[in-house]
Image: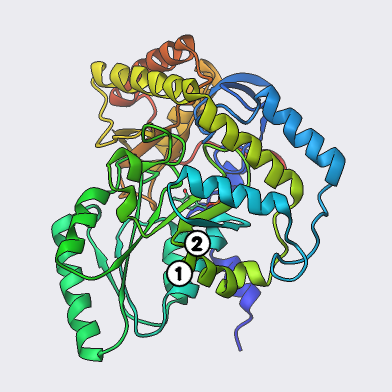
Amino acid sequence: MADIFERLLKNYGPIGEHRERSHGYYTFPKLEGEIGNRMKFRGKDMVVWSLNNYLGLANHPDVRKADTDATAEFGLAYPMGARMMSGNSVYHEQLEKELAEFEMKEDVILLNYGYQGIMSAIDAICGRHDVVVYDAESHACIIDGLRLHTGHRYVYRHNDVEDCEKQLQRATALVEKQNQGGILVITEGVFGMAGDQGKLKEICALKDKYEFRLLVDDAHGFGTLGKTGAGAGEEQGCQDDIDLYFSTFAKSMASIGAFIAGPRTIVDYIRYNIRSQIFAKSLPMPYVIGNLKRLEMLRSMPELKERLWKNALQLQNGLKERGFDIGKTDSVVTPVYMKGGVPEATAMVTDLRENYGIFCSIVVYPVIPKGHIIYRLIPTAVHTSGDIEATLNAFSETKEKLDAGAYKVEDIVHMAEAR
Ligand SMILES: Cc1ncc(COP(=O)(O)O)c(C=O)c1O
């Protein structure tokens, strides 16, 4: 019989296999200091482009005070137990009410974490006769939710509305043949890697021809898009046609937790049937009170979103002017596409960090095809014009070196910390 542990040790996976050279640097780096545009990495000052702290709320003094006061008053324990049994509070319900109003929906259910929350919501909503139609580049939490789904699913090419319609036709035919079940379409409001918005308006328009419900994961659109910051649905003028709107608090709100907004009856159904919340402790009070404070600021300080967009556009326009390919982003997420191997990419990142003081994340094979490198830059409201200029100059210089072959190395640059 094979020993499971023995098998694991033979193959640490596509990223884990490089851990001896990468751990603590390319993987599991430790950013230190106050969360913001500038932080310390291995003792050096860095301009940081890796944090989804879009509105800069993470370290705002009012947020820090709300978090601290709530922790002093309640600690991390209260309320104990799952919401349904003993873990409910007026603050949890107040946050749900305020989020529902903000998202222009009837009701909201809070989720402890976005990842397990949306997985579990898909499980709660879909029965075995239901069919899910979903975007090929959906976040891992949606894919894992679909693993729990025992019925059929049809994937459509990323943001390809024609293909979405084709899959809707297949799903409709299947549901009609079964004579039971319905259809759920799942997409994202903003795709976090490439920064392109989901084609929500076009998908909603398909409701004229097909019968389905729409669930949107708007993790990156919440707080960053739409007139009031209500997200990609508001931005595209189709918030009413989104049946279930999901976002995490892990990005614009710089916190922990998540929520789903929708019709009162359906949210209530989810409330009474979502296993990840029914069988887990509710959000601790400092998170709930901290999130109430963040939501109040998100609503009452439009200047945060304005500053975010000013910075995003300065960064994106600057990159385009210098000839960089930033793909199809129409959100603040800013990818920079380059060509090169994985070792080359690590040499370039090392140069950027060590000699230019620029900290950003790279995406390489196997997440994307071999020979491609994506830098993923996340502008925030607290970046400065100086941060952006320094970054643009660093990118121009390192790209020249990349094109000249200066980063050609045999293997991933060894930057791991001693363990
Ligand atoms: C699109 C998307 N959905 C869901 C999640 C998961 O949210 P959480 O971090 O709250 O688990 C993330 C990442 O945070 C995300 O990017």
Which quadrant is the N terminus positioned in?
Answer: bottom right
Q: Ligand 1 closer than 8 Å to the CB at disc 1?
A: no
| Residue nearer the viewer, 47 or 117 | 117
Q: Which mark is residue 251?
A: none
Q: Is residue 17 visible?
A: no
Q: What colour scheme has been applied to the protein in the rendered image?
A: rainbow
Q: Residues within 10 Å of mark 1 (few under 14, many from 20)?
A: many
Amino acid marked by disc 1:
Ile
| Residue nearer the viewer, 77 or 116 | 77
**Residue where numbered disc 2 is placed:** 118
Q: Quadrant of residue 401?
A: top left
**Left of 56 or right of it: where is 92?**
right
Residue at point 53%, 40% (across, down):
251
Q: Element under label 1?
A: helix
Amino acid marked by disc 2:
Ile
Q: Ligand 1 closer than 8 Å to the CB at disc 2?
A: yes
**Left of 243 or right of it: where is 299?**
right
Percent position of residue 167, x then y: 19, 69
Q: Which mark is residue 122?
A: 1
Percent position of residue 278, x then y: 65, 71
Q: In this figure, what is the number of numbered marks? A: 2
In the displayed structure, 97 sits above or below 56; it is: below
Which quadrant is the C terminus positioned in?
Answer: top right
Check contact, mark 2 vs mark 1: CB within 8 A.
yes
